[in-house]
Structures are given as C-alpha cells and as structure tokens.
Image (cartoon, rainbow, N blue to C red):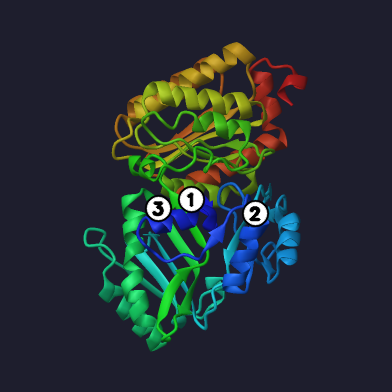
Amino acid sequence: MQVTGMQHGARLLRHVGFPVPEMLGADASEASIQALIARHGTIFVKPVFKGGVGKKGKAGLVGRATSLEEALAEKERLYFAQHTYGDSVVKSNGVTFEAGIPAEHEVYFSISDSTEFRAPTMTLTHRGGIDIEDLDPTEIANVPFDALTGLKAFVVANALSDIGAPRPIISPLVQQLPKLWDLLHHYGMTTLELNPIRMQPDRNGRLTPVACDFKCGFDRDDHRVARLNLPSDIFAADTSEFEREVNELRTHQGQSDVFVMNSKGTILAPTFGGGANSLVTELLGDEAIISSDFGGNPPYEKMKAVARICYRHWLQQTNVLFIIGGKSNNTDIYETFRAMGDALREHFAEHGPTPLYVVVGRGGPNLVRGMGALAETCDGLGIPYRQFGFDSAMSEVVLYARSVNDWMMAGGRAAIGRGMGISQSRAA
C-alpha cells in the first residue's frame, strides 16, 4: 500500500460519494476540536505517516479523546510518533482528528487483482475491525468479478448472504460498495482496502456504511492517477538515495519499481516482471540487495541509466549480478541486455573492476542476440557467467544464483579477483 489513513483517504472517497467521518487536520484550532467533540462525543487522534504504514492501532498509535485536554495530549504524543513497521522505522509528521462513529457492526472490504482467479477480486466480511487473517475462512467472501462490467450490486448481495451477514447491513452495503470499484478503476489504483467500515445508525435505525480507515496502492505508470491531483510528495516514503534516483526515471517508458531489501546483501537482482519479482524476492531472502521490476519494454537509454545507478550504489559489495525475468511478451531482450552490459563496461572503466559472477535467466524477443551481447561484455571484462533460457524453471535459476553466492563467499570471490588481476584488498 502506498497511501494509508483518512487524511488523503477521505478526499479520495468523496470522489465517488462514499461516506466518511467528519475530520480535522493538524492545523485545527482548539475551538474546532472542541466543537468536533461536542458534536460526536468521542474523537480519534491518528498520526500521519508518509506512504503506506500499517499496524498503527496494534502499536498503540491511535488516540481516543472525549475532551479537549485529552485530544491535545494525544496530539502531543502522536505528532512525531515513531513506528516500527516490518523492517522499517518511520516517523509521523502531523495528526488527524476524526469523529468517532458509533456502530454495532464493522465490515472489512477490499478489491485487488487475484493471481488465483486472474481477475479483480472482492474480499468482504462482516467481521471487520481486526486483521482478516485472524478470521475463519467461512466468514470471508472472496469473489472474482469481470473487470468489463465492474462490481455489481448483486455480487455484493450474494457474497453477504453466503457468509451469513446480518440482514440490516446488506442493503446499505449493496448500495455503497460498488462505488469503490469506480474509485479503483478510474483513478489508476491497483488495490483498495477499507477496514473498518462502521455501520452507523440514523435516527430511524437505518444503517449507513462509513469508512473509518483507508488503504490503497497505485500503478504510478497509469496516467489516470493524475486525475486525483495528489500532492507530489504523497509517494515519498522514507526512501533511500538509490530509490529516489531510480524513481526520477519513472516518466520514461518502462517500469522502474525498486525497494531496498537489505543494504548489506550480496546478490544484486535487476528483475523483470511482477511475478518474477515476487518469486525472486521470496527465494533470495536476506541475500537480495533490492526488490525490483524493470519490465514494460524500457528503451536502451532508460535501461542503461537504471543499470548505472544500480552499479554505482551496489556493485562493490555484490557477489552475483542476477538478471532474471520470465518469458517476455514485449520487452526487447537485446536492448535491455546491451544497455546493462554497456553500463557495466563503463562502470568498470570509471570505478575499476570488482570480482563478480553474472547469472542470467530470461526469455523473450531477441533473447539469443541479447545473451550474446551480454556474454561478449562479460568475456571482455573477464567476468564468469551462466545464462539460462526460457525453458529453465525460474525457481531453479534462483537457487543456482544462491549457490553461486555461497561459493563466492567461500573463496570464489577472491579466486575471481585474482583472475581479474585485482588486489586482495580491493577484492574484499
């Protein structure tokens, strides 16, 4: 997820008329906060983080207040709160004040692309407000639907009936939830999650779904994202200099998605394709320096620029340069491999050689020509290499790269360094 919380989520949901709680920003006056408490009785104070940051509630980073004094104390506690999320430590910069929504029922809802169904899939349960992984599978509906027709009301109604949802919540959800497909589809999102949606009763007891937390991810190469006029820094999580440099190339054709997995890793794996990225990241584990997807048929100039950035930041510590991807439909393998090889040759000329083993696993247009160009570069630089075509199982190629990395750490790096005429101190 790239965006979490209601600071931006409320504005996005208003694009399709989905109900959201009344809320104030960090610059709200004391009088405004007092008035919000007077209208709703209870408010929640939540920290604002850059990018997608989850598990704030479990970490005690959501404050509850029924008086101005409590609200201001929570603001002071959370304004610059520090949060450990996964392997990252992030710091908030601001808070929101959100009206408490009284409700007996809470709902979890999400839409994402499913690799199982090969279609957009709705996940829905009337046991919201907790981690969905903690629920019994019989209480969760996972329903694929046709992207051409969208999320229809009857799909929602059938799903709620199948999991035994209370009858009073079905009709309001059937009216409101299909709007969320319009939000995801028309504005370049890849996934969207609301948890919880609290079912707020009106004076007559009729329930209204109100989104009380929001998460979404965007395809930043989709031009429809620009329709939302989001702040330029909304995607600016606490990224490294390397990630920022690569992200500056996003305006060019092709993808350039990167994330530093382990700054002390020893396998540099420029990866092509989302499926390959998932498999490679999982199997390499802590040995991987970066997680990346450079697919989308990048032209020579962009691929060379990306490779130069990768080499400049990481090649000195790299044992294995692992170029991996599935069988491409449209990416020109010759152009990408030629660009990566030329960047490697120029890096050695500028910064000096470093002991390295190149492992390649790829398929697609101009594959043989591309492998030939890369092999010529490696031969010229004195770098050992091994190349696998589209008929090799990707998982086996990944395991081979790991075995080469083990060999490099057990003395292979020093042996290659001697063969390349590199001094022992520089090869270390």
Q: State how far apart marks 3 and 1 are (Cα).
A: 16 Å
Viewer-nearest of labels 3 and 1?
3
Closer to the chain start, of discs 2 and 1, is 2
Query: Which x, y percent locates residue 274?
Result: 42, 47
Q: Earlier in the sequence, mark 3 or mark 2?
A: 2
Is any part of residue 374 visible from this angle?
A: no
Image marks 2 and 1: residues in contact by CB distance under 8 Å:
no
Left or right: residue 195 versus residue 412 is left
Q: Is residue 418 above or below residue 56?
A: above
The type of residue carrying mark 3 is: Thr
In the image, what residue type sits under mark 1?
Answer: Ser
Residue nearest the observer in this picture, 188 or 96 = 96
Closer to the observer: label 3 or label 2? 2
Instruction: Determine which of the numbered discs, if any, sits on residue 29 in the image.
Output: 2
- Few, some or many residues within 10 Å of mark 2 (<14, 14–19, 20+): few
Mark carried by residue 185? none
Dot 1: what SS?
A: helix
* 36, 361: nearer the viewer: 36
C-alpha distance separating marks 2 and 1? 46 Å
Q: Residue 190 carries which label?
A: 3
Give the CA separation, mark 3 to mark 2: 36 Å
Q: Which of 25 and 313 is in front in this view?
A: 25
Q: In which quarter of the image is the C terminus?
A: top right
* SS for callout 2: loop
Q: Residue under circle 1?
A: 278
- Depicted 113 relative to depicted 297: above or below: below
Query: Residue, x 41% and y 76% (percent of image)?
Result: 208
Badge 3 marks a residue whose secondary structure is strand
Q: What residue type is labelled 2?
A: Ser
Expressed as whole percent of the image width and height from the top left, the position of residue 148 reads 22, 58
